[in-house]
Image (cartoon, helix red, strand yellow):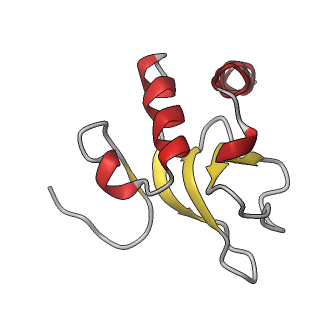
Amino acid sequence: FMEGPGPKAASLVDIADEIYDTRALELTRAAVAAGFDQFEVGFPSGDVDDTPIEVVWPEAKVGILPAGVARPSTLEEWELRASDHWTLEDLLATLRRRSEI
């Protein structure tokens, strides 16, 4: 298993070592259990401040920012919220809705 720079597809086996925000980890585990397993960890936002995005589902354009982190100025079409602003119900509903587009 080779790892290069930049985001990579993740699995439940290794995400606990890579997701530092506890709430984001809980949300990701629950989303994966609900079938949303195509996610990436450590996604670059590309904004001036290089705002970190803890976890994203790229096809749905949904992401979890670390708690207390402001939304980046980029990725305007994405649904991005800090981990403490997502409920599991909201996250799953948003993933379902945006996965159908």
Tag count in the figure?
0
Residue 4 shows in the view = yes
Residue 50, by quadrant, is bottom right
Q: Please name the residue shown 67% across and 28% down the image.
A: 91
Residue 55 vs 74, above or below: the answer is above
In what quadrant of the picture does the C terminus appear?
Answer: top right
Q: Nearer the viewer, residue 45 or 16?
A: 16
Residue 95, by quadrant, is top right
Q: Please name the residue shown 30% across and 55% down the image.
A: 17
Q: Nearer the viewer, residue 101 or 54?
A: 54
Q: In the rendering, at what x and y percent does residue 34 appear? A: 48, 16
Residue 10 appears left or right of 67: left
Residue 85 vs 20, above or below: the answer is above
Q: In the rendering, at what x and y percent does residue 27 appear? A: 54, 33
**Residue at the outermost left position:** 1
Residue 38 shows in the view = no
Q: Please name the residue shown 44% across and 57% down the image.
A: 20
In what quadrant of the picture does the N terminus appear?
Answer: bottom left
Q: In the rendering, at what x and y percent does residue 33 appear? A: 42, 19
Residue 95 appears left or right of 42: right
Q: In the rendering, at what x and y percent does residue 52 appear? A: 60, 67
Residue 52 vs 98, above or below: the answer is below
Residue 100 appears left or right of 11: right
